[in-house]
Image: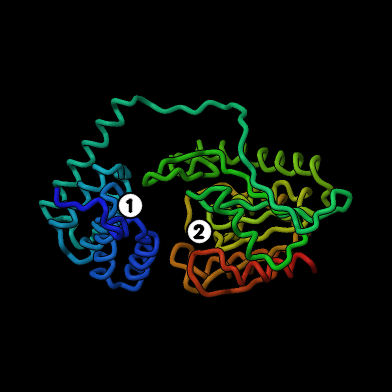
Amino acid sequence: DTIDIYQKDLGDFLDTDLESHKKEAGNAYRSGNYEQAARYYLMVLRYDIHDANSLYNLACCYGLLDQDGLAAQYLKRAVRAGFDDIKKIRSDPDFEKVRGKEAFDATVDSIASEIENKERELGDIIYIDNSALFRCRIRLPEGYDSQKSYRLVIGLHGGGESCEDFIKLWKHFEQPEFIYAAPQAPYAWLLNKKIGYDWALWLTGDTIVMEKAKEKLNEYIRNVVYDLEKRFKISNVYLMGHSQGSIFTYTAGIVNHRLFKGLIVLAGVGIYEPMPSPASGMVDIEWPPVDSFEAAKDLRVFIAHSKEDKTLPYALGIQSRDVLSKYGYDVTFCDFEGGHVVSPEVLKKVGAWLKE
């Protein structure tokens, strides 16, 4: 009854930039200022009490601050909001200071029991092989001429993102003279009330399922190339990926190397030698065999990695550069500032590299 519904500025809180607050929280967390990170997360949660990821991150901050009671309290709230990764809760190093304390351990055990009961009620999961249709966003160069041949760049977005997120990179290319396609990853997940997409059933943690999904993904990427070659006059094709998408830029690009002129890897994984072996920083995957790896060495490769990347450290980009160069690949490498992101400045360099 005390709310004046005609007050002009009453709804100004709806314009609060929560993503900016989350970014500041992440920056404070990475710099070790956990109290400041907690403040930002609490500000976010004042506007969205169902933000499970922010609740979990806040619990992590309290864990790092050795506040076992608060860490346990916000963990329970995160689970209530939908966070259900009990493996992460049990293994997260952010809780090292409070793990072993009676109240915190009891909370984690209770959460585990709750999650297990929910899963039991839902039954087991199996995966059925079937065809489906997926979105693919397309941008054409200014003054596009259907009688002219163009280079094609196919962009694989990061895990949890979408083709709509990745097609927006188009605006950062300077006067692009190529066709840009951003296909949708096939597997949808509801993460923090937002639908994100995954290329190979990543969140299952089941390596057998992921390997099967990767085989299907190789076929999917081939079909993207074949379909676009029917719709447009294409000269050379480049495959580009960020973060999780970088894994499949490497694997699908190498297996299907005859389809591509080059690969563009933005904030990507580290290639190990000898092959096959796991991609550092990510879930273990099976790399293409050595003979395929050697057969694909005519591919041009552009790698960009930030020295500030906390998700996939800079050393992984250097590692990939060195291994690929050793196998005879033509590798262009650049670093940039900004962390685990796609840098607009890097995209300008990619545009210039494509014209070489």
Label pair 2/1, CB-CB below 8 angstroms: no
Near-viewer residue (307 or 196): 196
For the C terminus, the quadrant is bottom right
* Res 277 seen here: no
Q: Quadrant of residue 57?
A: bottom left
> Where 300 sits versus 233, above or below?
below
Q: Report helix, strand or loop for mark 1.
A: helix
Q: Nearer the viewer, mark 2 or mark 1?
A: 1
Residue found at x 71% / y 66%:
351
Along the horizontal axis of the image, is 272 left or right of 105? right
Earlier-in-chain disc, 2 versus 1 = 1
Q: Which residue is mark 1?
A: 53
Residue found at x 73% / y 66%:
175
> Where 98 sits versus 174, above or below?
above
Q: How was this image coloured?
A: rainbow
* Gap between marks 2 and 1 measured at Cα: 24 Å
Expressed as whole percent of the image width and height from the top left, the position of residue 263 reads 69, 58
Q: Which residue is mark 2?
A: 280
Near-viewer residue (14 or 336): 14
**What amino acid is at disc 2?**
Ser
Along the horizontal axis of the image, is 61 left or right of 253? left
Residue found at x 18% / y 43%:
109
Q: Residue furthest right?
A: 147
Along the horizontal axis of the image, is 98 left or right of 85? left
Expressed as whole percent of the image width and height from the top left, the position of residue 223 reads 71, 38
Residue found at x 67% / y 38%:
219
Expressed as whole percent of the image width and height from the top left, the position of residue 65 reads 20, 66
> Where 218 sits versus 279, above or below?
above
How many numbered dots are placed on residues in this image?
2
Q: Quadrant of residue 267?
A: bottom right
* Res 67 seen here: yes
Near-viewer residue (122 or 58): 58
